[in-house]
Amino acid sequence: MKLTIQELSKNYAETTALSDLTLEISSGGVFGLVGPNGAGKSTLMKILATLIKPTSGSTFLDDVDIEKNPNAMRQVLGYLPQDVAVYPNLTASEFLHYVSALKGLKPKQSKQQIVDLLEILNLSEYKKRRLSDYSGGMRQRVGLACAFLGDPQVIIVDEPSTGLDPEERINLRNLLCDLAKTRIVLLSTHIISDIESTAAQLAVIQKGRLLFSGTAAKFTKATAGDMEKAYLGFVHGELQT
């Protein structure tokens, strides 16, 4: 499976969020999308998740234009937005059953998935607690569980480590790496450590423009393997592809 992004642009009034962005994202390893806050990462992810339309350009899932055929993406998508919205009066278990119904999953199919996801994301102990009593990090993990429901083949997660403690970040990175073996996994972040030991491929964007796309080895070639230094070099214009 492959996502192909061709000359994608998105304009808001007088602001350009994305400018002629071209990328190719394949299954077989986590793809890291990095850049400063306001770089256009969330805009790109919303376009890929078919929540907004680009001003120009095209995006294909294999050979299907997802702007013309959004259901082709929606049927295989697991998406975590930057801001996770939940119903505070529901428990985690109730909320996940609600989301699974929205995704069209059969109750028998979703029941075991929900049990497994709550266990994987260390939420089993709190599954009957109302979401209004959850911390920000716990809500983020509920959001991740929602994204993983239904065994999606395309997983898009926007700043997924927000609110997570160091142990939970490691757990998430390991989980995403495992899922990426057979799926497209796109992880957006402004924190280099989130993708340093995770991403097989990465892209750097700033002010809506692509600064770099390639392997981690290519990314750090000029900085002797120092990913943080390479990132700062591309963002500040000291390094170029």
Image (cartoon, rainbow, N blue to C red):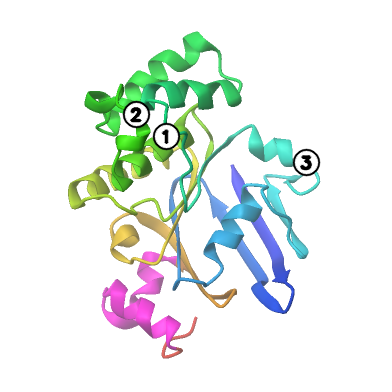
Which amino acid does the dot numbered 3 rest on? Asn
Q: Position of residue 133 (x, y in %)?
A: 30, 36
Q: Is residue 20 above or below residue 66?
A: below
Look at 21% across and 50% down and name the residue there: 165
Q: Earlier in the sequence, mark 3 or mark 2?
A: 3
Q: Secondary structure at mark 2?
A: loop
Residue labelled with disc 3: 69
Label drawn at residue 88: 1
Of badges 1 and 3, nearer the viewer stands 1
Please identify the residue farthest to the top as the structure is shown. 108
Which amino acid does the dot numbered 1 rest on? Pro
Label drawn at residue 134: none
| Residue 94 occupies quadrant | top left
Q: Secondary structure at mark 3?
A: loop
Q: Secondary structure at mark 1?
A: loop
Q: Give the overall secondary structure of the magenta segment.
A: helix
Q: Earlier in the sequence, mark 1 or mark 3?
A: 3
Q: Is residue 96 above or below residue 55?
A: above
CA distance for labels 1 and 2: 6 Å
Look at 43% across and 82% down and name the residue there: 234
Whether residue 10 is in magenta: the answer is no
Query: Is residue 24 something that shows in the picture?
Result: no
CA neighbours of label 1 inside 10 A, class few (<14), some (14 to 19), many (20+): some
CA distance for labels 3 and 2: 37 Å
Label drawn at residue 130: 2
CA neighbours of label 2 inside 10 A, class few (<14), some (14 to 19), many (20+): some
Give the magenta part as a residue range: 215-236
**In front: 54, or 223?**
54
